[in-house]
């Protein structure tokens, strides 16, 4: 065999071996995780619960034929029809009252507010009719209802459409208040809310609807739920605890990634539930990191962060703090319309980074 022929045989055998190795490596890789937007996760949760329990129905403005103002209920009217997916007139007090009455009569309504800013039109139904009835009936009359819709600041919708209602409804005994961040939160918490026998306020975020997140195999199951009242540690750390909910969990994770490059390890807690709050999870983290920052888009006075700080001060974790707890919040003004003013009225990643460095004195 000539030198050239020997060389060609060597190259071919080498290519064949490499091809076998590549094939083996290819088969060894795990399948790509399913990506799902928060919008689709909410849609899937409602679809599965409507299918599971014939007492469940959805009502609200444009939820049926228009597929929802934000397309969260896309396809449900075509699948379940007029009796299960009900378009209402523009009268929040009216259709919220109908939903509460239906819950008292044994159904399990999902009442959609086009935005939670409009829930102020129906706040008497939410607080006085839904939240207090179980107590006032000595436990004889439950009100299994979910009030859901987008909450908090969106973009360019000014003062009357930009407020966060987490503290408003979190203030009221008798309600459970949930605030999901990612797609798994949205699906698991909404399914738990629909199955719960108490009135639940479910605070979504318009700016998160189109954001895709990975969904674990477990979360893709029709039996997947997330326990109400349990927070989740989204990132482990030992220098400082960041506690947040909804969209601002993303901001905390972004800030933590930047700070990690400087040697500062932040522990990020996703509250998931505003009421009942998982104070034990926050305390355990503070006892480990000895520092605490709360982050929210709502106003500072009597806010979610204020409640967390008070609970830490009153509990066993207070003696573990090496610096005062800090709140990063929206600015204490009605939301401006101009974009540059709007951006400066809600927390940004740079504000979280600044507060972390200030707390750690670095």
Image (cartoon, grey):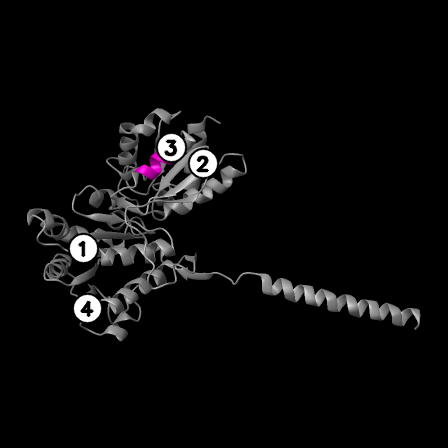
Q: Is residue 249 left or right of residue 13?
A: left
Residue 56: which numbered mark, if any? none
Query: Which part of the image, by quadrant, shows the N terminus?
Result: bottom right
**Main SS type for the magenta part?**
helix
Residue at image location 18% in from the left, 66% down from the top:
55
Q: CA distance from mark 2 to mark 1?
A: 41 Å
Q: CA distance from mark 2 to mark 3?
A: 18 Å
- Disc 1 vs disc 4: which is toward the camera? 1
Circle 4 crowding by C-alpha within 10 Å: few under 14, some 14–19, many from 20: some
- Does label 2 or label 1 sit earlier along the sequence? 1
- Does label 2 or label 3 sit earlier along the sequence? 3
Q: Is residue 59 left or right of residue 299?
A: left
Indicate whether 183 appears above or below 80. Answer: above
Q: CA distance from mark 1 to mark 4?
A: 22 Å
- Tell me whether circle 3 and circle 4 mark residues in contact (CB < 8 Å): no
What residue is pinned by disc 2? 353
Rendered location of residue 163, percent (x, y): 26, 46
What residue is pinned by disc 1? 197
Indicate whether 185 appears above or below 54. Answer: above
Residue at image location 23% in from the left, 36% down from the top:
302
Rendered location of residue 161, percent (x, y): 26, 51
């Amino acid at each position: 065999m000539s030198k050239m022929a020997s060389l060609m045989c060597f190259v071919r055998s080498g290519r064949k071996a490499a091809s076998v190795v590549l094939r083996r490596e290819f088969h060894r890789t795990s399948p790509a995780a399913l990506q799902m937007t928060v919008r689709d996760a909410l849609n899937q949760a409602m679809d599965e619960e409507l299918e599971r329990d014939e007492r469940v129905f959805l009502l609200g403005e444009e939820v049926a034929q228009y597929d929802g103002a934000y397309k969260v209920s896309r396809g449900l009217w075509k699948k379940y029809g007029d009796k299960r997916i009900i378009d209402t007139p523009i009268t929040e007090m009216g259709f919220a009252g109908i939903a509460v009455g239906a819950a008292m009569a044994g159904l399990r309504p999902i009442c959609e507010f086009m935005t939670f800013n409009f829930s102020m039109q129906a706040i008497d139904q939410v607080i006085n009719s839904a939240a207090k009835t179980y107590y006032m009936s000595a436990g004889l009359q439950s009100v299994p209802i979910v009030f859901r819709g987008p909450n908090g600041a969106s973009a360019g919708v000014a003062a009357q459409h930009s407020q966060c209602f987490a503290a408003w409804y979190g203030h009221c005994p008798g309600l459970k208040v949930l605030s999901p961040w990612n797609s798994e939160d949205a699906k698991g918490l909404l399914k738990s809310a629909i199955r719960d026998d108490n009135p639940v306020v479910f605070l979504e975020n318009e700016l998160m609807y189109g954001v895709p997140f990975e969904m674990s195999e477990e979360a893709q199951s029709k039996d997947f739920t997330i326990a109400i009242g349990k927070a989740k540690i989204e990132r482990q750390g030992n220098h400082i605890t960041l506690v947040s909910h909804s969209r601002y969990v993303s901001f905390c994770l972004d800030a933590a990634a930047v700070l990690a490059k400087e040697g500062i390890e932040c522990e990020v807690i996703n509250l998931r539930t505003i009421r009942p709050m998982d104070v034990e999870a926050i305390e355990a983290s503070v006892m480990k990191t000895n520092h605490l920052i709360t982050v929210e888009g709502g106003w500072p006075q009597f806010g979610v962060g204020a409640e967390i700080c008070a609970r830490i001060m009153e509990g066993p974790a207070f003696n573990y703090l090496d610096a005062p707890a800090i709140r990063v919040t929206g600015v204490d003004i009605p939301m401006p319309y101009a974009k540059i003013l709007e951006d400066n009225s809600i927390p940004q990643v740079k504000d979280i980074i600044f507060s972390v460095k200030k707390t750690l004195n670095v």
